[in-house]
Image (cartoon, rainbow, N blue to C red):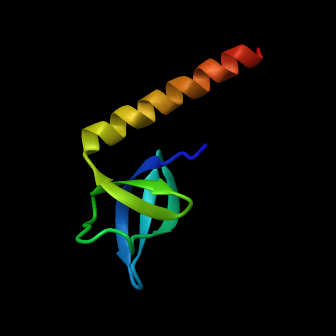
Amino acid sequence: MCLSVPAKIAKILPNEMALVSIDGISLEISIALIDELDVGDCVLVHVGYALAKIDPIEAKRTLELLQELGSAAQECRS
């Protein structure tokens, strides 16, 4: 199973790289697969690569759903 996670571009770096924030965690990723990204844009990240630019509202909604899923999994373990 593959999973991509929404992230917000915090800084564009040289060599088609960027610093992103995923729910407060910073990560350096490749943006080589997407043209015309700016600081503040949201992208889907999979194994260190931005795969697609996405709507910020959809990114927020997806992160909230992932947090809910994590909470539900935690309850099942208890």
Q: Residue at x 60, y 18 (%)?
A: 72
Q: Is residue 40 above or below residue 34?
A: above
Q: How many marks?
A: 0
**At x 53% / y 64%, what residue is drawn?**
48
Q: Is residue 59 left or right of residue 35?
A: right
Front residue of 44/2: it is 2
The vertical placement of 31 against 74, above or below, is below
Q: Quadrant of residue 19?
A: bottom left
Residue lying at 68% horizontally and 22% vertically, measured from the top left: 74
Residue 71 pos. (x, y %): 59, 22
Q: Residue furthest right?
A: 78
Q: Which residue: 54% across, 45% down?
A: 3
In the picture, the quarter occupied by the N terminus is: top right
34 w.r.t. 22: above or below: below
Can you name the residue that lies furthest to the front here?
Answer: 1
The picture quadrant where one finds residue 58 is: top left
For the C terminus, give its image quadrant. top right
Q: Is residue 24 above or below residue 61?
A: below
Please state which of residues 19 and 72 is positioned toward the viewer in this rendering. Answer: 72
Q: Which x, y percent locates residue 35? A: 26, 71
Q: Position of residue 59 (x, y in %)?
A: 34, 42
x and y percentages locating residue 75 in the rendered image = 68, 15
